[in-house]
């Protein structure tokens, strides 16, 4: 996982998990997840904990093998945890009602790989399915926390066109400068 020691400590903390749980209802307020949801890049599982009770079936794909082991130990009976890469998802076309990813896209090592992840998210969605993403934008604290990390920040101006090129129809995107970008894209 492309994260430095301090970043890993923060993201694996109970405080971070509590903050994510508190913010999750607002992050999904305008989203109908449906019955079969894929989470890409759950990391230490704070978002997975907050999502597990919001859908009938949750699958999470995580690239970091150590994180996969921790996630499987915690969620073995509630969430299908798959060791895999979001740019090459091991699922059939049109399986999921929704795909979500939270504060992980900036850890994808290039814009080209982010675009591949977007295309894969579109591929595995059912027609009408939604892709919700939330990611951080740079500010001084964010940059400090990411020293030594992989950090390829999304450009909120170009993001809607990138999602459309990946195959999505309707795309909504909004951002708060120096805070976060949030998008909702629908597979047509």
Image (cartoon, grey):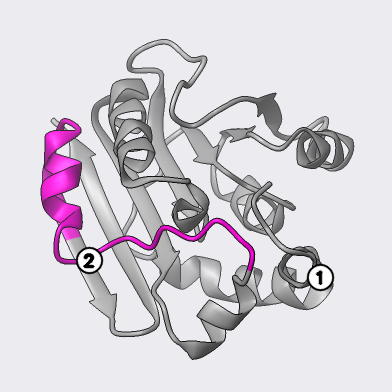
Q: Position of residue 111 (x, y in %)?
A: 32, 46
Q: Is residue 2 left or right of residue 170?
A: right
In the structure shown, which secondary structural element does the residue marked by tag 1 occupy? Answer: loop
Mark 2 vs 1, N-terminal side: 1
Is 173 in the magenta?
no
Helix, strand or loop under label 2: loop
Decide which of 111, 124 is in the foreground and name it: 111
**Label 1: few (<14), some (14–19) or many (≥20) C-alpha neighbours in 10 Å:** few
- Residue ID for mark 2: 156
Q: Is residue 27 above or below residue 92?
A: below
Marker count (numbered): 2
Q: Position of residue 24 (x, y in %)?
A: 53, 66
Reply above or below: 103 against 116: below
Q: Is residue 119 left or right of residue 76?
A: left
Residue drawn at the location 41% of the way across and 78% of the way down: 138
**Quadrant in which residue 153 is drawn:** bottom left
The location of residue 50, given as percent across then percent down, is 64, 58
Q: Which residue is mark 1?
A: 13
Tell me the CA gap for discs 2 and 1.
Answer: 29 Å
The location of residue 31, given as percent across then percent down, is 34, 54
Q: Residue furthest bottom?
A: 140
In the rendered image, residue 155 lying in the magenta stretch gets the answer yes
Above or below 181: residue 80:
above
Splitting the image into 4 quarters, where does residue 114 fall?
Answer: top left
Q: Quadrant of the C terminus?
A: top left
Q: Residue at x 29, y 38 (%)?
A: 115
- Between circles 2 and 1, the one closer to the viewer is 2
Q: Say which residue appears at 39% left-offset and 45% top-offset.
A: 110
Quarter of the image for residue 156 reads bottom left
- 166 sits to left or right of 65: left
Residue 1 numbered tag: none
**What residue range appears in magenta?**
148-172
């Amino acid at each position: 996982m492309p994260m430095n020691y301090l970043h890993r400590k923060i993201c694996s903390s109970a405080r971070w998990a509590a903050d994510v749980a508190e913010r999750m209802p607002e992050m999904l307020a305008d989203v109908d997840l449906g019955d079969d949801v894929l989470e890409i890049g759950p990391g230490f599982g704070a978002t997975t904990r907050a999502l597990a009770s919001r859908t009938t079936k949750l699958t999470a794909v995580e690239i970091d093998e150590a994180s996969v082991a921790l996630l499987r130990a915690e969620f073995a009976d509630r969430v299908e945890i798959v060791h895999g890469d979001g740019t090459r998802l091991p699922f059939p076309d049109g399986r999921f009602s929704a795909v979500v990813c939270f504060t992980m896209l900036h850890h994808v090592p290039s814009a080209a790989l982010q675009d591949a992840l977007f295309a894969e998210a579109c591929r595995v969605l059912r027609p009408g399915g939604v892709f919700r993403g939330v990611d951080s934008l740079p500010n001084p604290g964010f940059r400090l926390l990411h020293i030594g990390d992989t950090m390829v920040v999304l450009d909120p101006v170009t993001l809607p066109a990138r999602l459309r090129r990946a195959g999505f129809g309707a795309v909504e995107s909004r951002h708060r400068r120096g805070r976060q970008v949030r998008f909702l894209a629908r597979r047509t």
